[in-house]
Amino acid sequence: MTVKQTVEIQNKLGMHARPAMKLFELVQSFDAEVLLRNEAGTEAEASSVIALLMLDSAKGGHIEIEASGPEEEQALSAVIDLFNAGFDED
């Protein structure tokens, strides 16, 4: 099964190196595949910092988070919390 949810980017600089690295490190702790999709339809595996940077998403943009695997619910919840916390940047 796959779980999905759309979130709004809260941090003022959007998806840049620091949040991409935090997200990458977070998803490594779960047995789940996490895919992010921006409003333009660009997809990025959360297991690739370079792919996350290619999302080029700014504050106020929306990202769809999709998780699948044994710990998909926990992974989705943790990623949503990270986005909602603005990657702890503000």
Image: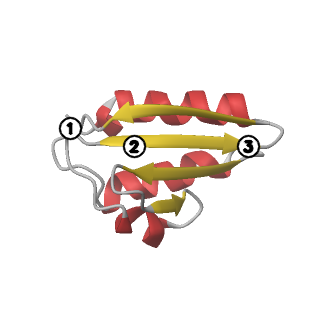
Q: CA distance from mark 3 to mark 1?
A: 26 Å
Specify the farthest residue to the front. Answer: 40
In the visual, does 8 lie left or right of 59?
A: right
Which is more N-terminal, label 1 or label 3? 1
Q: Residue 47 lies in what quarter of the image? A: bottom right
Specify the farthest residue to the right. Answer: 70
Q: Crowdedness of circle 1 by 10 Å Cα count: few (<14), some, many (20+)?
A: few
Please state which amino acid type lies under the numbered disc 2: Ile
Q: Crowdedness of circle 3 by 10 Å Cα count: few (<14), some, many (20+)?
A: some
Q: Which mark is residue 63?
A: 2
Query: Horizontal and vertical percent for residue 65?
Result: 52, 41
Count of labels shown? 3
In the visual, does 24 lie left or right of 27?
A: left
Q: Are marks 1 and 2 in contact (CB under 8 Å)?
A: no
Please state which amino acid type lies under the numbered disc 3: Ser
Query: Horizontal and vertical percent for residue 44?
Result: 50, 61
Q: Residue 82 lies in what quarter of the image? A: top left
Q: Which mark is residue 19?
A: none
Specify the farthest residue to the bottom. Answer: 50
Q: CA distance from mark 2 to mark 3?
A: 16 Å
Question: Circle 1 sits on which residue?
Answer: 60
Question: Circle 3 sits on which residue?
Answer: 68
Q: Are marks 3 and 1 in contact (CB under 8 Å)?
A: no
Query: Horizontal and vertical percent for residue 89?
Result: 25, 39
Which is more N-terminal, label 3 or label 2? 2
Q: Which residue does the image show at 80% across and 36% down from the upper left?
A: 1
Q: CA distance from mark 1 to mark 2?
A: 10 Å
Please state which amino acid type lies under the numbered disc 1: Gly
Query: Horizontal and vertical percent for residue 20?
Result: 40, 57
In the visual, does 15 lie left or right of 70?
A: left
Q: Nearer the viewer, residue 56 or 12?
A: 56
